[in-house]
Image: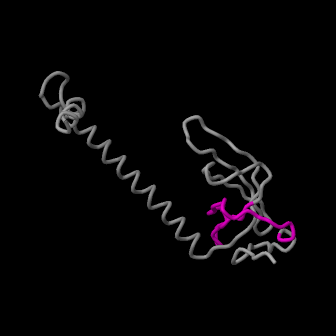
Amino acid sequence: MINRIVSGFLDGFIYKEGTKEVLWGKAIFNCALVLFLIGFAIHGNRKWAKLDSERNSEPRYSIGIITEKYKNIRSTNPKAYYKYYVNGRYYSGSNYYNTDHYKVEIGDRFYVKFYRKDPNNVEILFDKPVLSDDIILIKPDSGWVNIPEYK
């Protein structure tokens, strides 16, 4: 079974249609394309890992307000757009969220975690909604070092 699948894949990938004659131009192009896609995936993964590492090395927290929700027909999860305020400036971000775990509405407030040196490196914490209006009044411009505790 697996042999038949691999054979069928290779037939269209490197062989002349209906024969076992190797078309080297097609084979080289397709192999280069596969290597490029693998490299692109590895690079993208490293980029996200670096952003996560930076954000976790010197985190600050602010309050993000949901401004828009969008559900793409091809995606299983909707995307929430939000804005947040750091050092006298508004920033914006977006993240997908799982509707099975989180209820998100426009105007809802959640904590956001950002990298101290680059507030554009951000993630919204859907599991950390802002539960008190009092917290907003004491929010420092540069963000909190830790998420504030409610009293």
Q: Is residue 90 visible?
A: yes
On screen, 148 above or below 19? Answer: below
Percent coordinates x, y for residue 99 in the rendering:
63, 48
Percent coordinates x, y for residue 79 in the rendering:
64, 47
Magenta-colored stretch includes residue 146 = no
Furthest toward the top, the residue is: 18
- 10 or 25, which lies in front? 10
Left or right position of 28 against 105? left
The C terminus, quarter of image: bottom right
Who's the residue at 20% across and 23% down the image?
17
Q: Is residue 96 visible?
A: no
Left or right position of 104 against 41? right
Q: Which residues are magenta?
A: 110-135
- 96 or 151, which lies in front? 151
Who's the residue at 65% across and 67% down the image?
114
Q: Main secondary structure of the magenta part?
A: strand
- 137 or 29, which lies in front? 137
Determine the image quadrant of residue 145: bottom right
Percent coordinates x, y for residue 127 in the rendering:
66, 62
Magenta-colored stretch includes residue 132 = yes
Left or right position of 63 against 29? right
What is the basis of the colouring in this image? one colour
Determine the image quadrant of residue 101: bottom right
